[in-house]
Image: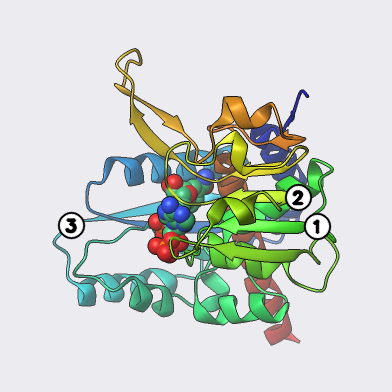
Amino acid sequence: MQAQIIDGNRIASQIKEELRDRLTKLHFAGHSPGLAVVLVGEDPASKVYVSMKARECKELGILSKQLDLPETVSEEELLKNIDYIQADPKVHGILVQMPLPPHISEAKVMERIEPDKDVDGFHPVNIGRMLMGAPGILPCTPHGIQELLIRSGNSPEGKDVVVVGRSNIVGKPIAAILMQKAKDANATVTICHSGTRDLAQHTKQADVLIAAMGRPQFIKADMVKEGVVVIDVGMNRVEDPKSEKGYRLVGDVDYEAVSRKAKAITPVPGGVGPMTRAMLMANTVRAAEIAFEKSQAKKH
Ligand code: NDP
């Protein structure tokens, strides 16, 4: 069987094109969206992610600002900077690139960001709204995964979805989104993790398998059923002397072997990654709209 390749780059472009009308309206109202990104330290992967986000902003005409802080910055100083940045009315969205150095509490940082400016969707208020199925800002990667499924013609409705991974940024929120009693969700969701007794027994049941483990090519062909739809969230650097950089990116799924059994599969790179950035742009536009609606309501 030749699997359908779910093209994250194409779907992400489509989503960004759809933002252009909303952006034009905001620009005309003198309310151009602005995103502030805070980067702590020198982590090379974080630097790459931040520069990719800035590039996407530029492409769409979204104003982006970046604050670089040293690895040694104190938690208090970082929180002060967050307060200062988000007090600027031109900043509609703010995100602090994770991971943070161990002396800084990520939870405290997430809680400091105002929920309406929390374009990462990690604030407990936004997480709560997501769990309740109430409108709010959804975390970028899980929301991007839902869009990938819908727009590739693989709706999760009524399906058995198995998520491998229970992190706060991918596993838990994707499960929360897809279990909602709502259109484009309504799936029966199982979450697996390192404490799962027989992982393959669960993954073999999946109509839709979402792998978010951070383990290179861990999911093998004998762990999935024929006709499965696979979303590979993993982004793992593995050594590759043939590559100029000395490494290449692989997912959590053994792509070659699993794609021979799957109905559809996302590649790595070019699957979930571009969707995460597209949803960040969508969240920034939404945050600017929320601010605009609030400012209009104050006038009346
Ligand atoms: P975490 O390390 O926070 O979580 C990994 C999860 O996988 C944990 O819940 C862990 O279980 C589980 N796990 C690990 N090993 C096994 C195993 N052998 N069997 C079963 N479960 C296992 O990772 P993230 O969620 O942050 O990221 C996951 C992957 O997705 C990474 O490769 C990351 O780079 C990538 N990623 C990609 C993004 C994108 O935009 N494409 C965005 C975000 C992440 P336990 O809880 O028990 O420890």
The chosen color scheme is rainbow
Q: Position of residue 267 (x, y in %)?
A: 60, 32
Cα–Cα gap, marks 2 and 1 = 6 Å
| Label located before the other in sequence (2 or 3) | 3
Placement of 74 over or under 198, stated as above or below: below
**Mark 3 lies on residue:** 71
Q: Within 10 angstroms of label 3, few (less than 14), some, or many (20 or more) residues?
A: some
**Mark 1 lies on residue:** 159
Residue projecting furthest to the left: 72
**Mark 2 lies on residue:** 207
| Label located before the other in sequence (1 or 3) | 3
- Residue at the spot x=71%, y=61% of the render? 29
User: Which marked residue is nearer to the observer: mark 2 or mark 3?
Assistant: 2
Q: Within 10 angstroms of label 2, few (less than 14), some, or many (20 or more) residues?
A: many
| Label located before the other in sequence (2 or 1) | 1
Q: Nearer the viewer, residue 102 or 13?
A: 102
Asked if the residue at tag 1 contacts the one at tag 2, i.e. Cβ–Cβ closer than 8 Å, the answer is yes
Left or right of residue 100, residue 168 in this image: right
Let me know if residue 196 appears in the view.
yes
Left or right of residue 275, residue 251 in this image: left
Q: Splitting the image into 4 quarters, where does residue 36 fall? A: bottom left
Placement of 78 over or under 108, stated as above or below: above
